[in-house]
Image (tube, rainbow, N blue to C red):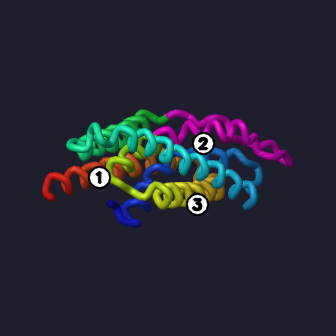
Amino acid sequence: MPGIFTLGALGASLSVDAFAAALSKGAEQPKVRWSDAVRVGLVFGFFEALTPAIGWLLGYLVNDWIADWDHWVAFFLLLGIGGHMVLQALRGGEKPAELSVAAGQKPNYVRLSLTAIATSIDAAAVGVTLALMDVNIWIACLVIGGTTSFVATGGVLLGKRVGSYLGNYATVIGGIVLAVIGSSILYQHLTA
């Protein structure tokens, strides 16, 4: 079972898509308010915490069927997700959905929620991996959601200063971290 450090690294690597979208939102704002940044962070954090739970449930249901090679499944899922993140960033990535808010208006929460769902799909696949590793899903979801909320809030606040320049670099680092975690899981199971 992974420790809190591993779950924190997992949460940080999963939150880079949300960070890039939040950076974009912050860069497009004429004025970034703390309360709006926190709201955006909470929306991203909620969906980033919810999707691993859905994936965990699916993984839990099939765990008995694949128990003998679950470490290989975890390795390939995390390697695939991480590799996809790196390739997407190196190709220039996809622009996040429009998140901007006109001066004096509240954020469009439907659009924001759809963006949060889109940036957290990879967390569902990671949730499958968490079930195979017998992780306490409640703690994992709290760490992943909390990390994402913090990172996305910071992304909105930083967006005005650094724009989307940092987004692709953050995605590359996040992808590499996921691949390293997958390799670590495989190594631990093969050497146990």
Which image quarter is the C terminus in?
Answer: bottom left
The residue identified by callout 2 is 116
Asked if disc 1 and disc 2 are in contact, CB closer than 8 Å, the reply is no
| Disc 1 target residue | 180
Q: Amino acid at mark 2?
A: Ala
* Residue 105 is one of the magenta-drawn residues: yes
Label 2 SS: helix
Residue 188, percent from left and from top: 20, 57
Label 3 close to label 2 by CB (< 8 Å): no
How many other residues sit within 10 Å of disc 3, few (<14), some (14-19) or many (≥20)? Answer: many
Q: The residue tagged with tag 1: helix, strand or loop?
A: helix
Q: Amino acid at mark 1?
A: Val
Residue at 73% in and 42% down: 109
The boundaries of the magenta stretch are 94-122
Circle 3 is placed at which residue position? 150
Looking at the rendered structure, the secondary structure element under dot 3 is helix
The 10 Å Cα crowd at callout 2, few under 14, some 14 to 19, many 20 or more, is many
Specify the amino acid type for callout 3: Phe
Please, is residue 142 above or below residue 52 in the view?
Answer: below
Q: Which residue is found at the position 67% from the left and 51% from the top?
A: 40
